[in-house]
Image (cartoon, rainbow, N blue to C red):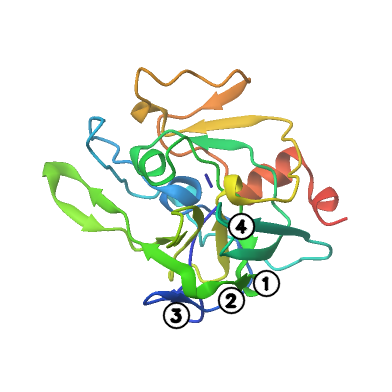
Amino acid sequence: MAGGGGVAGGGGVAGGGVVVAGATVVSRIVDCGGSCAAAPNAKASPTTIVSARMTSSYHPGARVHADYDRAMRLEGSCQCGKVRFTVESDTPYPYQLCFCSICRKCSGALTCNIMGKRETLKVRGERHLKRYHARVRGRGGKTRLAEGWRAFCGACGTHLWLEDKRWPEGVWPNAAAIDTELPVPPAHVFLMTRYKPKWVPWPDVRAEKFPEYPKLSIADWHDKHIGKSARRR
């Protein structure tokens, strides 16, 4: 959901492995909150993977947080346990759920991405990591590869995090892969709702709904609902 980006350039998944270096935190999410993006004028279908242009207000690289006083240390893993990782985050609230087809097909369900500091990412079992660039279909059905990529466990298929070389400071873990008890959000956001299949029920929580991208980035949402000082205590 979350937000912004990935492993590349200065660190991350290259070929079939992972490099565990990085930079500072990014404030926007790539591929719909760290997941995927959906085309503004595309009609959703069960078999169509869609993507969209990023809006400037939701751009992953628009604002960087470098003021980590006390980031929350998160631990995550794949289902089979071959890959384990840790990362620091001062934006750990899993508040947004994405309904786009890329997130649903890559994770098997609605997804929620949080945001972490790339330079703090530490990985065990990196030889098992695989990465995947989503196929993005725009207007006219033309397909391209997403610039960001998702890191998976090659053994069990767990979607672990999202990265993007355009925003090397950030990494966007799949909240479902985090083993640390995450804080309960005081509010929620549903994004890419125009791509929600009819058979998928609305989660039973009060939430702001957005056909595509929400107005606030992950960092901005935390500033508004959690507070800057609270995030860094």
Observer-nearest of 42 and 97:
97
Q: Which residue is mark 2?
A: 22
Which badge, 4 or 3, comes first in the chain's sequence?
3
The CA distance from mark 1 to mark 3 is 16 Å
The CA distance from mark 4 to mark 2 is 19 Å
Type of the residue with mark 2: Gly
Numbered badge on residue 77: 4
Type of the residue with mark 4: Ser
Which badge, 2 or 1, comes first in the chain's sequence?
2
Secondary element type, mark 2: loop
Which badge, 4 or 2, comes first in the chain's sequence?
2
Is residue 64 something one can see in this rendering?
no
Residue beneath the point at 60% across and 69% down: 118
Q: Which residue is mark 3?
A: 9
Which badge, 1 or 3, comes first in the chain's sequence?
3
Type of the residue with mark 1: Thr
Residue 126 place in picture, x, y as percent: 53, 73
The CA distance from mark 4 to mark 3 is 24 Å
Q: Nearer the viewer, mark 4 or mark 1?
A: 4
Secondary element type, mark 4: strand
Type of the residue with mark 3: Gly
Q: Which residue is mark 1?
A: 120
Residue 131 place in picture, x, y as percent: 39, 65
Q: Is residue 58 above or below residue 43?
A: below
